[in-house]
Image (tube, rainbow, N blue to C red):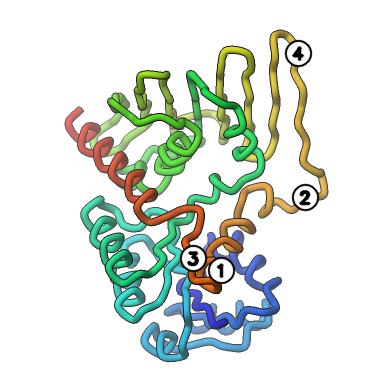
Amino acid sequence: MKIGVIGLGDIAQKAYLPVFAEQGDIEFHLFTRDQDKLKNLAAKYRFSHIHSSLDVLIESGVKGAFVHSATESHHQIVKQLLLAGVHVYVDKPIAYDYEKARELTELAEEKGLILMSGFNRRYAPAYKKLTELKEPNMVIMQKNRRALPGEIRNFIYDDFIHVIDTLRFLFPYPIERVNVTGKKNGMFLHHVVIQLQAEAGVAIGIMNRDSGVVEEKVEIFQSTEKRTALNVSDLFVQENRTETRVGGSDWEPTLHKRGFEQIVFDFLQAVGSKTLPLLTARDSLKTHEICEQIVLELEQL
């Protein structure tokens, strides 16, 4: 099976190329505008098929493609791939605004194609363990960064989108209201706090990008138990005054702990078997819709 890879930036190099290199039964076809980088990375990972343009890559007969280019280019690249009948996996976000994300989602559905967003946390073992806690009444997620305020739309769509999607994944109730607060200085957002409210409970998302630390923490509560995941990989279970660390193996690869291996496998299997992946375009679109609502409210502060 032929699979395209478009864009070879930092995330592609750290999280995806090492996984692709282990897939001996897949023929990967690579393209990026920087031809020197293309040749160097193809040689490093022993990929034989490199291309000078997206058009040439599509003409090679790829069945699916991973899009790791800059977010600003997602709409044009993903649309071209879908119109050519190619299944698409694209780094989050699909686009920087909801309407473009909706357009691509509807195009994929019209064409009967997969459009999958890179929400790797849904596949991380520690976070999947959190979903085993039934009927939670509260979920709290923090994803903080050190001294990195940002423009509102980029802050929310590039980074906070992971918090929104993870809360939706862990909080199994229809969301009735979304409350948004934040601190901004001019056009730069320093922190944001949201509440996703439902009759059965609340999910709280926090991102402080003027924080002294880089950290990620998720807590999920129900009447008899609390579970906590730290930095995507470490899981703790608390019952009354007893705390237990639930281990994966120390030898488990980082890309497995963070869900990248599993999300890649899910897309490849779905393309090969002509079935839907666990994460659908319509599901991802709901996350983008909430992002847009948050951006619009923060711009009014």
Select label 4 or label 3 by which is in front.
3
Q: Residue at x 67, y 73 (%)?
A: 23
Select label 2 or label 4 by which is in front.
4
Q: Residue at x 54, y 29 (%)?
A: 212
Q: Are marks 1 and 2 in contact (CB under 8 Å)?
A: no
Q: Residue tagged by mark 3?
A: 275
- Secondary structure of the residue carrying tag 4 is strand
- Secondary structure of the residue carrying tag 2 is loop
Of all residues, the one furthest to the top in this rendering is 241
Q: Residue at x 48, y 55 (%)?
A: 118
Q: Residue tagged by mark 2?
A: 252
Question: Quadrant location of residue 27?
Answer: bottom right
Left or right: residue 301 versus residue 229 is left
* Mark 1 to mark 4 CA distance (whole Å): 41 Å
Q: Earlier in the sequence, mark 1 or mark 4?
A: 4
Select label 1 or label 2 by which is in front.
1
For badge 1, the amino acid type reads Leu
Residue 266 in sight here: yes
Q: Residue at x 33, y 74 (%)?
A: 82
Q: Earlier in the sequence, mark 2 or mark 4?
A: 4
Q: Residue tagged by mark 1?
A: 268
- Other residues around mark 4 within 10 Å, as few (<14) / some (14–19) / many (≥20): few
Please give the label number shown on residue 242: 4
Left or right: residue 273 versus residue 126 is left
Where is residue 210? Give x, y as percent: 44, 31
The answer to which of 136 and 68 lies nearer the viewer is 136
